Amino acid sequence: MFKCVIFSFITSHPIMKISPRYSKPNQLEQCEIVAVLVNGDVIIVSSNERESFSFDQSIVQSGALCSSLHTCNAGIIATYSGTALLCKHTDDSHTFKLFPGYIGLCGKEVWIKSLSTLHNSQSEKNNVLYLAECQMDCYWKVIIANCIGDVLTEFSFQNLSLRVTAYCAVLLPTKEDNYSNVYLILATSDNNLHLLQCTINNSTQIVSTHWKL
């Protein structure tokens, strides 16, 4: 069997999570990997450079656990011990700081398990929303926010006899400008799939709670 290895590297600790990063649009052929090590360190490894990152110590304590890692046009987003963090590609200090807006502050109220991006694939506009999955003892919740962390909609699943086992979300345009339809698909522990839909306004801070089954 033919094996092609472009490059290899050895890290100081086992890697827990990895994500590709393309922060250099003119060099997409260059492979860049964002990696979270088991000791909590975040590094970027490419074929010709290695970068390390730090955290705002007032937010993230030493030894905090990373539950999600994602890269986007804005930078690298991660969740540590229930808190959402962002390191912008333009930040030369390579420091993870609190995510802007409500998404960054709500970590005091809810435990953010993961944070990812939600794109409108059928729209010519490059609008990007953020999807936060929150896990609490008595309920499961998702929050959808705009690029500055303001909440556009949220949905809570509160059923003591059931739990959410998997989910996905799709963002589609509507006939009206600045509006989008969010479709949320939930899989629950009773082997059922649930499809929910909510219309949101991308340009305001009005929180929409009108979810339809």
Image: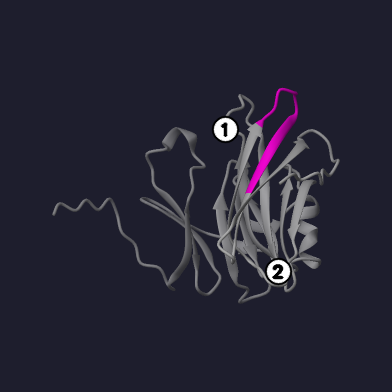
Q: Which is more foreground, mark 1 or mark 2?
A: 1
- Residue with the mark numbered 2: 57
Q: CA distance from mark 1 to mark 2?
A: 37 Å
Residue at 31% from the left image edge and 59% from the top image edge: 8
Location of residue 207 in the rendering, given as x and y in whole percent from the top left corner: 84, 44
Location of residue 118 in the rendering, given as x and y in whole percent from the top left corner: 62, 43
- Callout 2 crowding tier (Cα within 10 Å): few <14, some 14–19, many ≥20: few
Location of residue 203 in the rendering, given as x and y in whole percent from the top left corner: 79, 33
Nearer to me, 101 or 180? 180
Which amino acid type corresponds to the residue marked 1 in the rendered image? Ser
Residue at 61% from the left image edge and 63% from the top image edge: 54
Quarter assignment of residue 193: bottom right
Q: How is the image coloured?
A: one colour
Nearer to me, 74 or 150? 150
Q: Is residue 96 visible?
A: yes
- Residue with the mark numbered 1: 121
Total marks in image: 2
Q: Which residue is at the far left? A: 1
Quadrant where the image shows the N terminus: bottom left
Q: Is residue 174 magenta?
A: yes
Q: Is residue 69 above or below residue 15?
A: above
